[in-house]
Each structure stands twice: as C-alpha cells, then as structure tokens.
Image (cartoon, helix red, strand yellow):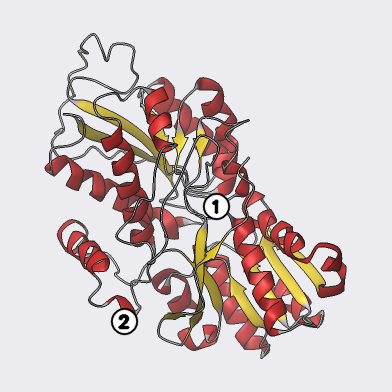
Amino acid sequence: MKRRTVLAGLGAAAVPLRMHSVAAATPGVTETELRIGNTAAYSGPASAYGVIARTEAAVFKMINEQGGVGGRKINYLSYDDGYSPPKTVDMVRRLVEQDDVAFIFATIGTPTNTAIAKYTNSKGVPLIFLGSGANKWGDPKNAPWVMGWQPSYRTEAQIYTRYALEQKPDCKIGVLYQNDDFGKDYPAGVKDALGADFDKHVVKVVSYEITDATIDSQAVALQGSGADVLITAATPKFAAQTIRKIAELGWKPLHFMTNVSISVGSVIAPAGKQNALGMITARYLKDPTDPLWKNDPGMNEWRAFMAKYMPDADLTDAGPVFGYGVTTCLWQVLKQCGTDFSRANIMRQAANLKDVELAVLLPGIRVNTSPTNFHPIRQMQLSRWNGESFDLFGKVLEGTADMG
C-alpha cells in the first residue's frame, strides 16, 4: 500500500523532466520542481502518526502557493510504509532510485529509519529531520548525511530521572519500553542520570514488542515490583493502553510519558482523561489544547494554517503541531539554499541553523545546528496533565545528548 502526494502548482499531468545545465547533475531538481521523498505510517500499529505526513503535505502546498522555493514548486512524494521496516526500505529505494528525489524528509519511526539510514548515508542522500528522537541520529562523524530534529530520547529520560530523584530521593523506578532503538534510549538515559546508583533505584525494566496485542502483563509486573516511579517509552497505541491499565490496577506511580505519545486526541482521550491525571512529560512544542496559547501569535499562525489547509483535522491532536514545526524548519533550510539544491548544499544548510524560532516551539527553545551538532533541538520543559491539558512548570532544561 502506498500513497503519492503531488502538490498544488504541479498538477496531475507529468512534470517536465527537461533539466537545465546546472540541475542536470542535481537529483530531484528540474527547472520547475524540487522533489522531496517521505515514508509514513498511514496504516499499521503506528497509524496515529499518519496525520504528521498529511500536515507536511499541507505545509508544502502552502509554500507552493506562496511561490515555492528558489523559483521551484515542491513535489512531495509520500508513501505508506505501515511502520514496517522492510516496507520502508522498499519505499525509500523507490524514492531514491526511481522517483529521483533530492532528499528524504521526516520519515516516521525509529525502527523504520534504522532500516534505511545506512543506505541513504552510503548513497549521499540527505535523510533529514527524521521523525525519531533516537540519540544516534546526531552523529555527523559516522553518519554525515543523517540528521534528526526533535530532542533525543536519551536526554528526555535523563530529565525524568533527575526530577524523580528530586521529588522522591528514595524512589523505586520502573521502566516500560518498546523493544527497539526508540525504546532502548530510555533505560540508557536513566542509567546516564543514575550512574552507580542504577541498581539502587531501578527495580524493574520491562519491554514489549510492537506486534504485541497489549502491555497488560508488563504493567502488572511493574506494579508488582514495588515501583513508585514509572517511565513509559511507548508509541501512541501502547501509551494509551498503559495509562488505562495503570488506572484499572489502582496503581498511582509518579508517571512519566515519552513526549511522542502525549497527544490529547490520539492518546489521552482514548485512555481516559482522568486516568492520566498527574502524568508528566517533557515538551518542546506548544500543546494545542493548552489555554495558555489561546492568544499566542505562533499558535494563531498554526490555527490559521489548519483552518485553511486541514479544516477537518482534530485540533487536539499534537501530530499536526509537530508536522507544521518540522516542515517550517525545513522551509528555513530551503530558503538558505538559495537556488542551489544540490544534496551537499541541502545538508550544509541543515547543519547551519542559528537560533531559529518556530511558531510552535515553546518560548525560549530555539533550533541550532552546526557541522558538529546534528541535534537541532536540545531543550525541553516539564509539564503535568491536569485532566484537561498539560501545565508547564519549572524552567527550560538543556539536554546533554552526545553530539557525536
């Protein structure tokens, strides 16, 4: 199953493939277009993330209506990989070898990106602002053509652990994680923060597979361990299950939830809003359900975009906020490229972002990259679910992820 999105300004007819001399050796670039490739989970166990790619397509449509970039319209080719790594490999090979895209943008998922990163890196094809916070995506020395965007999962886990220790010096920590490179960054981050005290505080670490039906048995085992702190690293379906099961068990740990699974629309509401009461996460994006941003200029910009380009979307879903943020960040990269959309220059400009402000980032959080820093966003702020929205508290915290 696959999906192809060709944006406004290009039409349904075949795009002329005649290239001028400058673009002749530049993949994905013609006189009239810039081709960008993507895969996303429009179906499968992580289909809640499909709205992100749909938002990206809508932003590109907006950009095209405003004249495009460097005199060219963007042709965004997005295929459904079902969150299945073998499918991702097939789709990305098609994008690179048949569709001749300039680069791959915002592919969703840690296991899926893990399956393609070596291939794209070996081909010199930029894989940029991919939709995963795995710490390994910030390694310019060994993967100079691969760059993440969101904060490192490992950094996030460090922040949770330090806060838990402040609140409960004798805390007993349980960790539930998805058994892949996404999930494994969380126990690693806990270990970073605890060091030699890891065994003193961590009483249970349990994983689940993306193919599992439920996490019920894992939740029961964690409760039985005596843990009074729970750090959950799960994708939306399993995050909602975890919140609901904890409530059914009558267990009330200090609960930290990965920031990739805190959407009110796709996680909190299905789990039961009251079941998540008191749950803590670390944010870098504004919460569309938070009254704090009712008159915020940045969120008003996002709401105006949504009203025009995605009028039927759920405005409580955090997915479109991410999609808007990551795509407007790419827009800045493309502006910096001028008219040189060679793969080398795209990567060069992605690694040359200086204090970029985005409408949907929390105040005080900026995008910064350099040839030695492939972690664009390294700051987060804690927030707590109050039953209707997340309340920010504390100060903006800087991560300590390895820059590679």
Disc 1 residue crowd, few under 14, some 14–19, many 20+, Cα 10 Å: many
Q: Residue at x 22, y 13 (%)?
A: 19
Total marks shown come to 2
Residue topped by disc 2: 291
Q: Residue 170: x percent and y percent?
A: 80, 83
Q: Are marks 1 and 2 in contact (CB under 8 Å)?
A: no
Disc 2 residue crowd, few under 14, some 14–19, many 20+, Cα 10 Å: few
Element carrying mark 2? helix
Picture quadrant where residue 390 is located? bottom left
Q: CA distance from mark 1 to mark 2?
A: 27 Å
Q: First in sequence, mark 1 or 2: give its number.
A: 1
> Which quadrant: the N terminus?
top left
Picture quadrant where residue 214 is located? bottom right
Instruction: Indicate the amino acid at tag 1.
Output: Gly
Q: Residue at x 68, y 77 (%)?
A: 164
> Residue most toward the top?
21
> Which quadrant: the C terminus?
top right
Position above or below: 172 against 332: below
Instruction: Indicate the amino acid at tag 2.
Output: Pro
Residue topped by disc 1: 133
Element carrying mark 1? loop
Frontmost residue, 340 versus 88: 340
Q: Residue at x 70, y 75 (%)?
A: 219
Q: Residue 139: x percent and y percent?
A: 60, 38
